[in-house]
């Protein structure tokens, strides 16, 4: 199994080295024009190739201006070996860093829907609270933002897309044991019970479990 995994990983990196100049150029041009579908398309191409290694591998791409960071992570313990071996065998490329998490997410979370409606939320303005575990053992997360908006209103889907990006920034994908999550006005929460979203991953690891 290990030999088979190593072969798939080698094939992924071989593809990556051959394709990365194109990926960089496409992503950087899309950043300049705020072409979010094209940026997402680059990430999806990476995801399509990494899926050939095995399931539950999540990739996050960050950067621009000639320097890029690719975070390789997984919320699933079953994929830990794949992630570890991917990072251990990553190529040495001048324009790339390969890490297990992006320590400094983008200053703003920017989401856009199919109609072109756009929402920008400063990452540092979002806080969170974990709710008590449910009977099934799952734990839900509420994100709070100091802004007056209706999560069920016309732009509510954009705010929930921001919540999904917060989860991706912290974990790569929804981790096992997480129930629902949502972004709501901070006035709906007890601010004293919330923490900066930068602490989400650590607080999740340290949470009491039933």
Image (spheres, grey):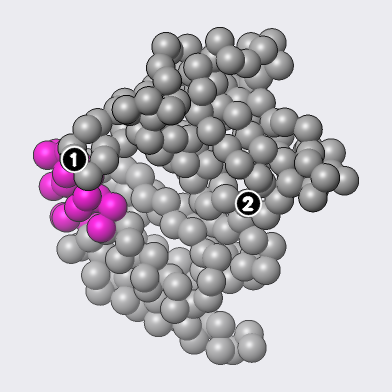
Compare residues 24 and 112 and report the one nearer the observer.
Answer: 112
Residue labelled with disc 2: 175
Residue 162 seen in this snapshot: no
- The overriding secondary structure of the stretch rendered in magenta is helix
Asked whether 101 falls inside the magenta stretch, the response is: no
Query: In the picture provided, is 203 more to the left or to the right than 14?
Result: right
Residue 50, image x, y percentages: 43, 70
Q: Which residues are magenta?
A: 24-41
Helix or strand or loop: what does disc 1 sit on? loop
Q: Nearer the N terminus, badge 2 or badge 1?
A: 1
Residues packed near mark 1 inside 10 Å, few (<14), some (14 to 19) or many (20 plus): few
- Residue 64: horizontal and vertical position, in percent? 25, 43
- Residue reaching furthest to the right: 210
Residue at x 26%, y 64% (from the top left corner): 20
Can you give x and y, in whole percent of width and height, for residue 100 in the image? 54, 52
Residue 199, image quadrant: top right
| Closer to the camera in the image, 20 or 160 | 160
- SS for dot 2: loop
Residue at 63% across, 51% down? 175
The N terminus - image quarter: bottom right
Identify residue for label 1. Answer: 115
């Amino acid at each position: 199994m290990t030999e088979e995994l190593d072969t798939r990983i080698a094939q992924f990196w071989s593809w990556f080295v051959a394709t990365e100049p194109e990926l960089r150029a496409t992503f950087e041009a899309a950043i300049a024009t705020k072409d979010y579908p094209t940026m997402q398309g680059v990430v999806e191409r990476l995801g399509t190739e990494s899926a050939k290694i095995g399931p539950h591998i999540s990739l996050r791409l960050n950067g621009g201006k000639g320097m890029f960071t690719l975070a390789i992570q997984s919320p699933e313990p079953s994929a830990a070996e794949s992630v570890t071996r991917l990072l251990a065998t990553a190529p040495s490329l001048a324009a790339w860093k390969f890490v297990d998490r992006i320590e400094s997410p983008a200053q703003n979370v920017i989401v856009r829907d199919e109609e072109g409606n756009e929402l920008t939320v400063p990452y540092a303005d979002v806080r969170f609270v974990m709710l008590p575990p449910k009977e099934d053992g799952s734990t839900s997360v509420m994100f709070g933002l100091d802004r007056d908006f209706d999560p069920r209103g016309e732009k509510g889907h954009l705010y929930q897309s921001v919540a999904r990006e917060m989860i991706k920034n912290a974990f790569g994908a929804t981790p096992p044991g997480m129930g629902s999550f949502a972004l709501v006005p901070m006035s709906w929460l007890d601010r004293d019970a919330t923490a900066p979203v930068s602490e989400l991953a650590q607080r999740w690891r340290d949470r009491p479990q039933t």
